[in-house]
Amino acid sequence: MKKLLIPLFSVVLLISCETANVSNNGTSHPTSSVARGNKAFLAAYKTIKADDLKKNLYVIASDEMGGRDTGSPGQKKAGEYMVNYYKNLGISYPKALGSYYQKVPADYMKQRGGGNLPDSENILAFIEGSEKPEEIVVISAHYDHVGTRNGVVYNGADDDGSGTVGVMEIAKAFQAAKKAGKGPKRSILFLHVTGEEHGLFGSEFYSDNPVFPLANTVVDLNIDMIGRDDPENRGKSYVYVIGSEMLSSELKVINEAANKKTNNLILNYKYDDPSDPERLYYRSDHYNFAKNNIPVAFFFDGIHEDYHKPTDDVEKIDYALLEKRTQLIFATAWEIANRENRIVVDKK
């Protein structure tokens, strides 16, 4: 996450079930009645696993990636790993883009205070919708971090390695549903942006140069730090949700329904206020969608003791909690992608 310099309708239920059961190994899955409500959803949901999140994060946030600073060789290497992951899943890129990469030029970032950053890239993977392909659900996370300082690698396992692998795992789940003949009705864009730590540059570039018209973009579900807990919530199964009712009266309702019918996390709205002193509504990539009147929800675990420190390492991630949060975001995206009507924009 960027460091702060200055400071309804009737929801079509995703599933018809009781709240989630918690297994002996600490992971959670919906009860069997979920399968009776929506077998396709349940099968895809179950593909999201802590072990797979961990496997990918141990690569993305390894010393080999050198802290993934914007445009650095390590960031590009992490990007190559992500692209190969999507290729292996059979998930392609937007046809209009012609590849998985959207170049973010050095000059663009320099004009916005990016100093001497080199050219970098956003990475885009795409699953076309089966019924409403022109409507786009964006699931985003930044894959850059702050690099290496004085010879010490800042691995950024939580910030935002956790969000990066969360997006990858959600893509796997949607692809599993597609292979089973139950692909999303709306298209899903899996957007990994660069330059977030230096000024939200990658998401701003995308919003200035969208691959799909912003008018057709239904929502941005942005994931930035979902692998840890903060001192205020130590040991709790929770997630901060920010911005979900700023522009739409429906998005928060959908997210809460998805949560209740799956892992039933504590949804913490402490930072869900543009006037909050931490100004978190403005500090991650969702804001470049929100300022274009696109509904957003930002999922976040809080500011913990290893934030922007070299100690933000893979060994400190709570993988069971990372799984639950990733499942919630998938469940929310599933409902938005498959409901009859696109969510409304009815707030300013």
Image (tube, rainbow, N blue to C red):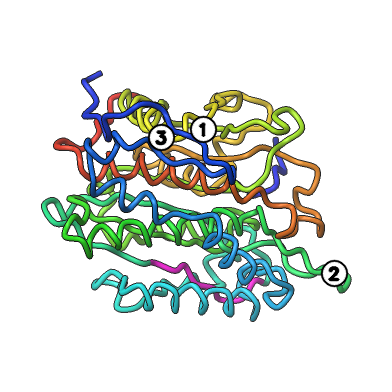
Which callout, 3 or 2, points at the residue further toward the start of the chain?
A: 2
Is 73 situated above or below 31? below
From the viewer's side, name the closer residue of 15 and 133.
15
Residue 262, disc: 3
Q: Which residue is mark 1?
A: 241
Q: Quadrant of the C terminus?
A: top left
Percent x, y for residue 327?
44, 45
Alpha carbon distance from label 1 to label 2 = 32 Å
User: Which contiguous range is marked in magenta?
Assistant: 117-124
Which callout, 3 or 1, points at the residue further toward the start of the chain?
A: 1
Residue type at mark 3 is Thr
Q: Which residue is mark 2?
A: 152
* Point 29% across, 78% down: residue: 98
Residue type at mark 1 is Val
**Where on the picture, by quarter, is residue 209?**
bottom left
Residue type at mark 2 is Val
Label 1 crowd (10 A; few <14 / some 14-19 / many >=20): many
Label 3 crowd (10 A; few <14 / some 14-19 / many >=20): many
From the viewer's side, name the closer residue of 266 and 294.
266
Residue 142, disc: none
Kindly check if marks 1 and 2 are in contact, taking CB atoms under 8 A apart as contact.
no
In the rendered image, the residue lying farthest to the top is 8
Is 71 situated above or below 299? below
Percent x, y for residue 195?
58, 62
Q: Main secondary structure of the magenta part?
A: strand
